[in-house]
Image (cartoon, rainbow, N blue to C red):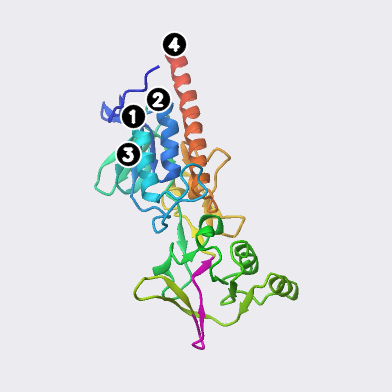
Amino acid sequence: MTNRPAADEARETPGRDGSETVWDAVVVGGGAAGLSAALSLGRARRSVLVIDAGQPRNAPAEGVHVFLTRDGTPPAELARLGRLDVQKYGGVVRPGTVVSVRRLPGEPLGPAARFAVTLGDGTEVLARRLVFSTGAVDELPDVPGLRAQWGRGIIHCPYCHGWEVRDQRIGVLGTGPRAVFQALLFRQWSDRITLLLHDAPEPTPEEREQLAARGIEVVTGRVVRVLSDSGSGSLTGAELAGGHVVPLAAIAVATRIVVSDAMLVPLGAAVAEHPSGAGTFAVADEFGRAADGVWVAGNLANPMAQVITAAASGVMAGAAVNADLLMEDTAAAVAARRA
C-alpha cells in the first residue's frame, strides 16, 4: 500500500461560497501532543494541518527525559523530528498563532467544515474537527532571580531533572502543604537536601521526624532572592530575609500549572481545577474529547503529564478524531446511497 499523497492542500469541498478548502482536522499546538495527534491522523490518511506558535512549555530545558529512545534530546530537536514524521504522511505544519475559533452554523454531513480557525495574520482555515494541544503555563513564585534560572538551576520534576542534579546540594522551596513530600521525594536523588520553608506551613511533629530520619535540613524564613554566579550563570544559593545565604546547586519549585480557556469555553468545553491541586486543566473524556468536534491533548488535558505522556494522549486523541470522522463519512455515504 502506498502512503496518502503528500498534499499541501486539503480536500476541496463545497463551502459557504461554493468551494473552500476543508481540513479533516486542524491541530492547534505543535508540541509532542499535537504532533502525535497529527501523526495518527496522517497515518489514517486524513488531511491534517498543525498550527504551531513555537512557544513550548519545555523550551528552557536542556533535554527531554524519560522518553524511551529519545532521552536527553533537546526539546527543539524532538519537535523538529516530530514535524518530519508528520510531513511523511502528508500532514502540514504551519507556524502561526491562532487568535480565534468559531463553530460554523448548520449540521454538516460528510466532508463539510464545522469550524473556522483565524490566525494572527488574518488567514482563516476551515476544519471538520479540532485538536487543541496548546499546553500550559507554569506560574512561578515571585522571588527575584528565580525565573532567570527556570529550566536550569530551578527545577520542578525529579523524574525529568533529578538525575542531572544527583548528589548535589538541592533546596526545596516550600510553597504549599506538599513541601515536605517534595523534599522527601528529592532525597532519592541526593543526601544533601534542604527544605526552605518560605511560604509552606510548619511541618507537623510526624513530618519533622520523617525529615530528620532522612537527614533533610529545614530552614525557616522567607527566600528573598535566588543567587547565580555572574560568570557561569549557575545557581549558587538562596538568600533569606535576614541576609543569610544557603549554598545550593539547584532549587526545586512546585509551580501552579494553568491553561487558557479563551478558545475552549466558547466551543462548549470546560476548564476546571485539577483534582491534584496542581492547577487547571481542560475537562475531557478518556479519549480527549472535550466538546462536540473538539479534542484536547497533552498538558492542556493533564497538567502532570511528562512529554512521553503528552505524546501518548495525542495519539489517543488522533485515533478518536479519525473514528468520529469515520462515522460521519459513513452516515453521509448511507444518505447518498439512499438518495
Question: Mark 2 Cα within 10 Å, few/some/many (few <14, many 20+)?
Answer: some
Q: Secondary structure at mark 3?
A: strand
Q: Amino acid at mark 4?
A: Arg
Q: Nearer the viewer, mark 3 or mark 4?
A: 3
Q: Which residues are magenta?
A: 239-253
Q: Where is mark 1, residue-wise?
A: 90
Q: Position of residue 144 (x, y in %)?
A: 42, 76
Residue at (50%, 27%) from the top-left corner?
323
Q: Quadrant of the N terminus?
A: top left
In this view, 211 is above or below 18: below
**Real-space Cα distance between discs 1 and 4?**
30 Å
- What predominant SS class does the magenta segment belong to? strand
Q: Amino acid at mark 2?
A: Arg
Q: Nearer the viewer, mark 2 or mark 4?
A: 2
**Real-space Cα distance between discs 2 and 4?**
23 Å
Q: Position of residue 74 (x, y in %)?
A: 40, 51
Q: Where is mark 4, residue-wise?
A: 337
Q: Secondary structure at mark 2?
A: loop
**Circle on res. 93:** 3
Q: Secondary structure at mark 4?
A: helix
Q: Residue furthest top?
A: 338
**Earlier residue among tags 3 and 4:** 3
**Earlier residue among tags 2 and 3:** 2
In this view, 297 is above or below 182: above
Q: Are marks 1 and 4 in contact (CB under 8 Å)?
A: no
Magenta region includes residue 242? yes
Q: Secondary structure at mark 1?
A: loop
**Real-space Cα distance between discs 3 and 4?**
36 Å
**Real-space Cα distance between discs 1 and 2?**
8 Å
